[in-house]
Image (cartoon, rainbow, N blue to C red):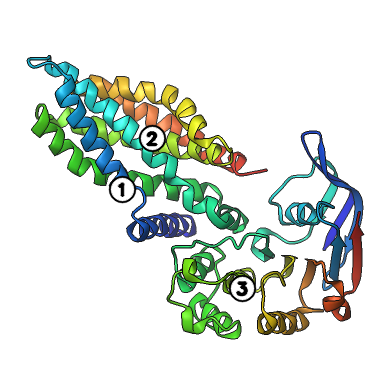
Amino acid sequence: MIHARRLEKRYGIRRALWPLDLDLERGGFLVVTGANGSGKTTLLRLVAGLAAPTGGELEVAADRGGLGYLGHEPLLYRDLTALENLDLYGRLYRVPERRERAGMLLERFGLWEVRAERVASYSRGMVQRLALCRALLHDPELLVLDEPFTALDAEGADLLDRRLRELAGTATVLLTTHDPARVEPLASARLALT
Amino acid sequence: MNYLADVTALARKDLRLELRARDTLPAMLLFVLSTFVVFHFALPSGADELAAQGLLWVALVFTALLGLARAWAPEREDGALDGLVLAPSDRSAIWLGKSAAVFVFLVAIELVALPAFALFFSPLDAGAVLGVLLANVGICAVGTLLAAMAAASRTRELILPLLFLPLAIPLVVGGVGASVSTDPGRYLAFLGLYDAVFAILCWASFEYVVSE
């Protein structure tokens, strides 16, 4: 699903990602760890197509419609409600029966009761839950998650754990975390960036 | 059909955001009306009507600039532009949807501004109104692209006017010509040509503007 050879990224003279090789087969679950500034987010942005490599080769066997991305920012509109945000992305991703799918995800992530409230009124954890709903809305075959447990409370983290367990083996998952023990049972591969 | 549906959804989203937040339209309206008041007192009594027509275009271009500076603000917050860029729809639909929304904002402002101008200075003829409408298309096409480029920069408030104003000069030339000439047809044709050329250029180049 993802193959990289000597993949690197520079911003001017600053090297954001040192050359790395990477192979992740379809259905694999890769956990990426590393200190702050080691290039975890850069790697995920490269895989998602949000940034272009400055060196090496990268091949991702999923088009944009098959990729679900959760970054450090939620990629949501604060002045839209949860339902309006998911409806917009559902349209753009051509999700069949997008309203039903959005409703199911909102219910699953405990946001159904606040679905008609603006995202600006949400707590950080609720925004993260909604961002997860957005990333999962179109049932992606490749899921790219940048520290997805950030800001989630215990209940939210359990919900995400459950969803990741369901996805393991079916979708391909690339996940960065500072707490690898949490996803260790699901991991089929590990990458430590230095 | 999917492309048009995407453009419509994106433009509708911008209109909904503006109706809720009311960040941009009231500021643009206040600005253009204040500008007319200042011009009204700045122009000496008995000043040429032609001078007033020129001032209309100064006011419209700077009002548009005010709106363009805010055009990508909702996408800057919380990284929503990345969300749109990741979607499988054609990326030019993002530009077209935003341009359409900015066009609606401009027309809404002008529905108040043009009668106000007629009240303060002199009535506008059909050539001038057509010139304003055609100039709106060029302003939105070019301005939305440049605003997207500027939005990625920390100095966006400085960069946008520096990029936009030189490219708006032909629009002002065509617009003033259409407003004051006895034969506005060739000026309107010039504005139409500008719109067509720059709309195609902006449509084709937006993909590269949002690529890192």
Q: Report which quarter residue A182 is drawn in.
A: bottom right
- Secondary element at tag 3: helix
Q: Is residue B182 visible?
A: no
Q: Nearer the viewer, mark 2 or mark 3?
A: 3
Task: Tell me the quarter of the picture where residue A72 sits.
Answer: bottom right
Chain hosting mark 1 = B
The disc, 2 or 1, on the residue closer to the chain's N-terminal end is: 1
Q: Is residue B64 above or below residue B127?
A: below
Residue under numbered circle 2 = B65
Task: Report whether residue B45 is seen.
Answer: yes
**Which of the labelled discs sits on residue B25, or is there none?**
1
Mark closer to the observer (1, 3): 3
Viewer-side residue, A106 vs A158? A158
Q: Which residue is mark 3?
A: A125
Q: State the residue at coordinates (24%, 21%).
A: B176
Q: Are marks 1 and 3 on the same chain?
A: no
The residue located at (19%, 25%) in the rendering is B39
Image x and y of residue A110, in percent: 57, 84
The chain letter under disc 3 is A
Q: Amino acid at mark 1?
A: Leu
Q: Report the Cα–Cα distance between label 2 and label 3.
A: 37 Å
What kind of element bears circle 2? Answer: helix
Q: Quadrant of the C terminus of chain A?
A: bottom right
Q: Position of residue B73 (x, y in %)?
A: 48, 49
